[in-house]
Amino acid sequence: MKHGACEPKSAMRTVLHRPQPLRRIELVHPAPLHPIDREGRARRLLNVLVAAVGLGLALPLMLLVAVLIKLTSRGPVLFKQTRVGLDRRALSRAGGNTRRRIDLGGRAFTIYKFRTMRVAPENSARQVWAVPDDDRVTPVGRVLRKFRLDELPQLINVLKGDMNIVGPRPEQPAIFVYLREQIEEYQRRQRVRPGITGWAQINQGYDTTIDDVSRKLRYDLEYIRRQSPFEDLKIMAHTIPVMAFGQTGW
């Protein structure tokens, strides 16, 4: 930084700090750089069919949840938030894609969830992780989070084409950019469409630290490597007991 001419030369020195290295993860088979499109019409039809049937079966429960939310706390029933979705661009070898001045890491979309927290003040727009025993979570919200019932409205996102039933969980834009800078290979999870449930979700609970994210990333990239309709059906089947017994929720 340039200072005034009257200052001594020692004040003009610039101290460079060595950047912190990215956290590395070990992969037996590296995830691809290019987006994977294994859906085709049959795979897309499977997602639409499961989402439509799921909405029909869950509709009475969703109406009950909506009433409980409305009666127990002020604010809307549904919580809407911007998340990062599928990135169909070819990745650069540097962190993220460098063809845009501001790179969100994928196509942004609006995700729908049942509201589990008290409505935040208008001036608190900073994107942060929720944590266990978070005092922002309502009593009804704790039950919804434990059994992952707050995710049910995302069946609408599947019908819209923003998400699949199975895939890596979509992250908030600011948090995604931060994690991409902290964890090597993180951006490669955007090679597939995000999902409501996934291999990482049934094996691990909510993220609270960078180490949690690193462990989940291993599961996500493992899923991407072996993604198939059969794999999706197997993960869907494993999700049912996870929801029924609240194994990875809080």
Image (tube, grey):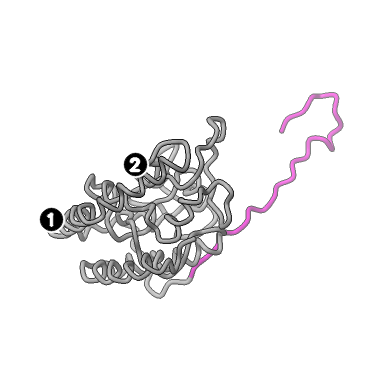
Q: In the shown orientation, is residue 158 left or right of residue 208?
A: left
Q: Amino acid at mark 2?
A: Phe
The N terminus is located in which quarter?
Answer: top right
Q: In the shown orientation, is residue 111 left or right of residue 75?
A: left
Which region is colored magenta? 1-25
Q: Secondary structure at mark 1?
A: helix
For the residues labelled 1 and 2, the Cα–Cα distance comes to 22 Å
Residue 11 is inside the magenta segment:
yes
Determine whether 210 is above or below 3 in the image. below
Q: Residues within 10 Å of mark 2 (few under 14, many from 20)?
A: some
x, y (%) of residue 219?
41, 68
x, y (%) of residue 158?
25, 50
Magenta: main secondary structure equals loop
**Residue furthest bottom as drawn:** 28
Frontmost residue, 90 versus 37 = 37
Disc assigned to residue 41: 1
Q: Secondary structure at mark 2?
A: strand
Q: Which residue is mark 2?
A: 109
Disc assigned to residue 49: none
Q: Residues within 10 Å of mark 1 (few under 14, many from 20)?
A: few
Of the numbered discs 1 and 2, the one sitting upstream in the chain is: 1
**Mark 2 and mark 1 in contact (Cβ < 8 Å)?**
no
Q: Amino acid at mark 1?
A: Arg
Residue 227 occupies quadrant = bottom left
x, y (%) of residue 146?
45, 60
Q: In the shown orientation, is residue 4 left or right of residue 34?
A: right
Residue 191 occupies quadrant = bottom left
